[in-house]
Amino acid sequence: MISWAELRKYPLDEKVHKLYQHATFVTAIRYYRHKVNLYLLGNDYVEVFVNHKKAMIDKIDLLDRSHSRMKFYSDQIKLSL
């Protein structure tokens, strides 16, 4: 199992590969121009920001639990915080 501390050191393309190997998909939301896929990686929630217009992943980041995006997740699932 890989941790967020390890994953964050990789370049974007390797982050994608490692996430799909080691993380579990939880849910997806729409957030402005992105589809944001939420994954559980060990004890951490990781967001993958997919820009469909560009057909690419813009960024992968640790879930910011204080962000207003949390309300979109809480409508769908209960996150263990």
Image: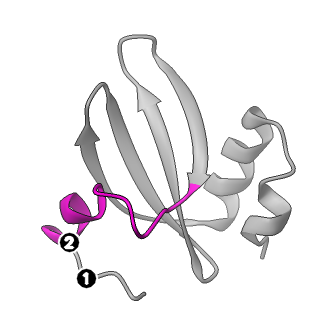
Under mark 2, the amino acid is Ser
Q: Quadrant of residue 67?
A: bottom left
Residue pointed to by mark 1: 78
Secondary structure category for the residue under label 2: helix
Residue for point 78% across, 76% down: 1
Q: Position of residue 24 (x, y in %)?
A: 51, 68
Tag of residue 1: none
Under mark 1, the amino acid is Lys
Residue for point 36% across, 20% down: 52
Q: Is residue 56 left or right of residue 81?
A: right
In-front residue for pair 72/38: 72
Q: Position of residue 45 (x, y in %)?
A: 52, 69
Q: Which residues are magenta?
A: 62-76
Residue pointed to by mark 2: 74
Looking at the image, the residue that sits furthest to the bottom is 80
Q: Is residue 48 left or right of residue 65?
A: right
- How many neighbours does mark 1 have within 10 angstroms: few (below 14), some (14-19), or many (20 or more)? few
